[in-house]
Amino acid sequence: MTVLQVSNVSRDYGEKNNIVHALQDISFSAAQGEFIAIVGTSGSGKSTLLNLVGGLDTPDKGSIIIRERELSGLSRKELTIFRRRNIGFVFQDYSLMPVLNVYDNTVLPVTFDKGSYVDHSFIEQLLKELGLWDKRTRYPNELSGGQQQRVALARALAAKPAIILADEPTGNLDSRNAVEVMGLLKNSVKKFGQTILMVTHNESLAQTCDRILHIEDGRLLPERSGE
Ligand SMILES: Nc1ncnc2c1ncn2[C@@H]1O[C@H](COP(=O)(O)OP(=O)(O)OP(=O)(O)O)[C@@H](O)[C@H]1O
Ligand SMILES: [Mg+2]
């Protein structure tokens, strides 16, 4: 089943003499449960692509369809709700709320969503799986980088989204923690049938994914089969 369909998407920044073609005519689709790595040099357009798929930014051309809904057809309000329910974000810098403890950071996106309730037993299960249950009343500044990134992962998974967008989720971690966070992401995909788009500079991590999308100068390179 196709969860995500990106068709002929382009995004420019700046204007006239200073125009940057951040993405040009990008098309691909992602099936349910696929773990996709996005690789490319700095400035090639990887974060731009995640921002567009996540509805944080809008394409100048083309369409993005998630679970049969075209993002550009949604109002601002609809998009906010759609995003909370269908998309989980994990960023390199964790983006945790310093004034909230581990538990409250995890449930934050769900508590924002008036139509949803917090499934406490699921959150407990999630935090236990991520080795964070004992830390649930701790604050981000009391945690290691690896632990903070696991909280960010818990938060992204809390609403059981169809798609997880991860921008260099292991970029600030040492190799041991990077492997661990990757393992947890992989388990989640399997268990909940989620699709993950993960930007990474780590070639060996990319090789462990179902597919690799290479972006260069805003363009998608043809996919090699067997990758
Ligand atoms: N908000 C913005 N305004 C202007 N230019 C932007 C903006 N966002 C991105 N760009 C430009 O678009 C291009 C693609 O940027 P993007 O952040 O997607 O690259 P990236 O592949 O994520 O790079 P990195 O690996 O360094 O994170 C770059 O040339 C960047 O300078
Ligand atoms: Mg980036």
Image: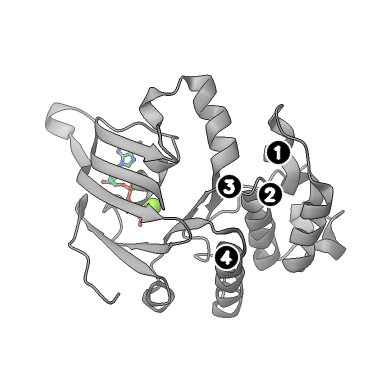
Q: Earlier in the sequence, mark 2 or mark 1?
A: 1
Q: CA distance from mark 3 to mark 1?
A: 11 Å
User: Residue 166, position in %: x, y?
Assistant: 49, 55
User: Within 10 angstroms of label 1, few (less than 14), some, or many (20 or more) residues?
Assistant: many
Residue type, numbered disc 1: Val
Q: Secondary structure at mark 3?
A: loop
Per the image, the residue denoted by label 4 is 185
User: Residue 218, position in %: x, y?
Assistant: 22, 49
Q: Is residue 202 above or below residue 39?
A: below
Q: Quadrant of the C terminus?
A: bottom left
Per the image, the residue denoted by label 2 is 158
Q: Is residue 59 left or right of residue 176?
A: left
Q: Residue at x 38, y 67 (%)?
A: 201
Q: Is residue 119 visible?
A: yes
Q: Is the Cβ of the residue at disc 2 closer than 8 Å to that at disc 1?
A: yes
Which mark is in front, 3 or 4?
3
The quadrant holding residue 183 is: bottom right
Numbered tag placed on residue 161 in the rendering: 3
Per the image, the residue denoted by label 1 is 110
Question: Front-most of 12 and 27?
Answer: 27
The quadrant holding residue 224 is: bottom left
Q: Is the Cβ of the residue at disc 4 closer than 8 Å to that at disc 1?
A: no
Q: CA distance from mark 2 to mark 1?
A: 7 Å
Q: Is mark 3 within 8 Å of ligand 2?
A: no
